Image (cartoon, rainbow, N blue to C red):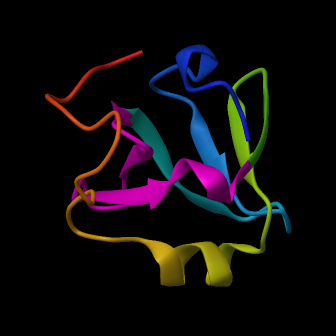
Amino acid sequence: MIDKSRIPSGVALIGACGTEIGQVDGIEGDFIRVLMPGGEPAYLPLTALADQEGEKVSTVMNHMAARSLLQSEPEPGEGSGPFTSS
């Protein structure tokens, strides 16, 4: 799993296949907040992330599988709290 403190806001979130999913908007607990095309936010578990390089964060799965994990709200749990931006 990627160190969440090193994930910058404003970079592209892409599937392992190279297809863009959305734009990183920040971290909330153990979830990455993603702005989807159209501007609506969604949340992806940090465990779904593979790597961060330059202006891209990639997932461990293709874009379709990653999209199936998106949630409208992050689940409460360890590390959850007010929205924080990296």
Provide residue 66's location: percent of width, then percent of height.
61, 72
Q: Is residue 58 above or below residue 48?
A: above
Residue at image location 73% in from the left, 63% down from the top: 15
| Nearer to the camera, 49 or 11 | 49
Q: Is residue 71 above or below residue 47?
A: below
Provide residue 24's location: percent of width, then percent of height.
46, 38
Residue at image location 51% in from the left, 84% down from the top: 68
12 on left or right of 45: right
Q: Quadrant of residue 64?
A: bottom right
| Nearer to the camera, 31 or 20 | 31
Residue at image location 22% in from the left, 53% down from the top: 76
Provide residue 81's location: percent of width, then percent of height.
18, 32
The magenta stretch spans residue 36: yes
Q: Residue furthest front?
A: 78
58 on left or right of 76: right
53 on left or right of 36: right
Q: Which residues are magenta?
A: 27-49
